[in-house]
Image (cartoon, rainbow, N blue to C red):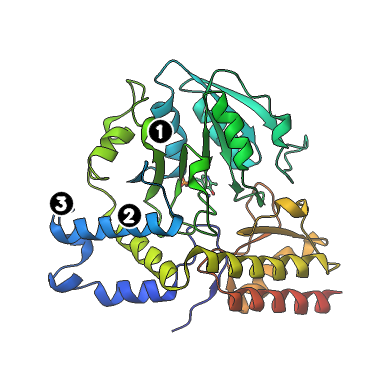
């Protein structure tokens, strides 16, 4: 068996023990004589899978009891519509948006279909480059917003940031709350869920296969949906039916549950944070100490999950990628919007993988100096 080191941004690497467990259980899931994909989602066997996944996620992130965990479909882009449809049905019909990169731009545009979506801060340097988060004191908060949308890890631009308790308090004092797209860094470290009204994202980076969307929503926000909101996307319906208002993505939820258990067995998120910080430090140090590679993000905002970098001599890009693949390092091509390279170093990408990448980068630089 040959497995590469996979730096893909998503769908992305999954922990090998999880894949092996899925393989072992594929044909006969827990003595049922069928795979987990072939059984009723309403039966006791699958119900147990879903409840276990949800409860493990709650323990991992220490999610307070006044929040629901929903497993949905439609991805984070779907949720960009589902969020405003669920939150703008009351008196407040404005959403505030902080623009920090490609994904928060998409979120703001989509929300505009369901209400007024205002840009209250924008880190665009004028040429579509994003290297920091706007300082919260500069945000032009509306006095009547239903919520303030942020993306705390921008997968394409490689910026990451967490709001402070003080910021949350300021926003909540105005009757609003934070909603964050955490698709690409959920579970990378411990998180204070209580700072947010809603956290959402697609599973296909740090959680499992694509097709599952997670939504962590404070209970008091479940009843603000617009009348046009599709029943299957109305959080209240999904919450009241334990994520089974309609048939859930059963295989994906099962896999996500195994990933949650793998995280728990490996020390939980405190341990993950240590490993993720060490991986990111090694990679950023290598870039900063090199004359060939460059990362333009301001150091405090550098993402620990998505590390975009550029070769100062761009004519070497394809040679770099070809050599990387030959060395067993896959998925390094940067997003087409920004070019260059990107190494996504999610939880399932080991320190060993980052060490192999760094060794390749250094050897490549020596060769092409
Ligand atoms: N938000 C972020 C931060 C993402 O990284 C992605 C996927 N790369 C999306 C939204 C879109 O997710 P999906 O394709 O699952 O809709």
**What x and y, as percent, mark residue 105?**
60, 35
Please rate how many residues cluster around mark 2, counting C-alpha atoms within 10 Å: few if below 14, some from 14 to 19, many from 20. Answer: many
Closer to the observer: label 3 or label 2? 2
Q: How far is mark 2 from mark 1, CA to CA?
A: 21 Å
Q: How far is mark 1 from mark 3, CA to CA?
A: 25 Å
**What x and y, as percent, mark residue 251?**
29, 59
Please rate how many residues cluster around mark 1, counting C-alpha atoms within 10 Å: few if below 14, some from 14 to 19, many from 20. Answer: many
Q: Residue at x 50, y 49 (%)?
A: 183
| Residue 252 makes an appearance in the image | no
Residue 179 relative to residue 307: left or right? left
**What x and y, as percent, mark residue 263?**
44, 67
The residue identified by callout 3 is 42
Q: Residue at x 81, y 65 (%)?
A: 288
Q: Residue at x 54, y 29 (%)?
A: 172
Q: Residue at x 52, y 49 (%)?
A: 192
The answer to which of marks 3 and 2 sits earlier in the sequence is 3
| Residue 110 makes an appearance in the image | yes
The residue identified by callout 2 is 54
The residue identified by callout 1 is 82
Viewer-side residue, 121 vs 162:
162
Q: Residue furthest bottom?
A: 1
């Amino acid at each position: 068996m040959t497995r590469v080191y996979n730096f893909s941004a998503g769908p992305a690497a999954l922990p090998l023990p999880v894949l092996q467990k899925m393989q072992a259980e594929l044909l006969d899931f827990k003595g049922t004589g069928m795979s987990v994909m072939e059984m009723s989602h309403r039966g006791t066997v699958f119900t147990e899978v879903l409840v276990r996944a949800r409860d493990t996620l709650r323990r991992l992130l220490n999610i307070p009891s006044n929040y629901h965990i929903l497993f949905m479909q439609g991805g984070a882009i779907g949720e960009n519509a589902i969020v405003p449809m669920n939150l703008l049905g009351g008196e407040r019909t404005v959403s505030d948006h902080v623009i920090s990169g490609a994904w928060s731009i998409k979120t703001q545009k989509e929300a505009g279909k369901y209400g007024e979506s205002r840009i209250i801060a924008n880190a665009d340097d004028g040429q579509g480059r994003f290297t920091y988060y706007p300082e919260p004191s500069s945000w032009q908060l509306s006095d009547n917003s239903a919520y303030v949308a942020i993306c705390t890890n921008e997968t394409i631009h490689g910026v990451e940031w967490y709001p402070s308790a003080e910021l949350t308090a300021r926003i909540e004092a105005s009757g609003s709350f934070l909603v964050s797209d955490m698709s690409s860094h959920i579970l990378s470290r411990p998180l204070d869920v209580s700072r947010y009204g809603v956290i959402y994202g697609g599973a296909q980076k740090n959680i499992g296969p694509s097709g599952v969307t997670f939504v962590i929503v404070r209970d008091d926000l479940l009843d603000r949906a617009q009348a046009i909101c599709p029943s299957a996307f109305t959080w209240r319906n999904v919450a009241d039916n334990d994520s089974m208002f309609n048939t859930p993505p059963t295989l994906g939820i099962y896999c996500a549950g195994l990933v949650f258990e793998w995280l728990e067995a490996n020390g939980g998120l405190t341990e993950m944070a240590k490993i993720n910080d060490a991986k990111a430090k090694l990679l950023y140090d290598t870039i900063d100490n090199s004359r060939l590679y460059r990362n333009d993000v301001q150091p405090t905002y550098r993402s620990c999950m998505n590390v975009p970098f550029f070769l100062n001599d761009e004519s070497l890009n394809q040679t770099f990628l070809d050599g990387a693949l030959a060395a067993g390092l896959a998925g390094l091509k940067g997003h087409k919007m920004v070019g260059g390279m990107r190494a996504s170093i999610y939880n399932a990408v080991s320190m060993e993988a980052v060490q192999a990448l760094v060794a390749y980068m250094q050897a490549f630089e020596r060769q092409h100096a």
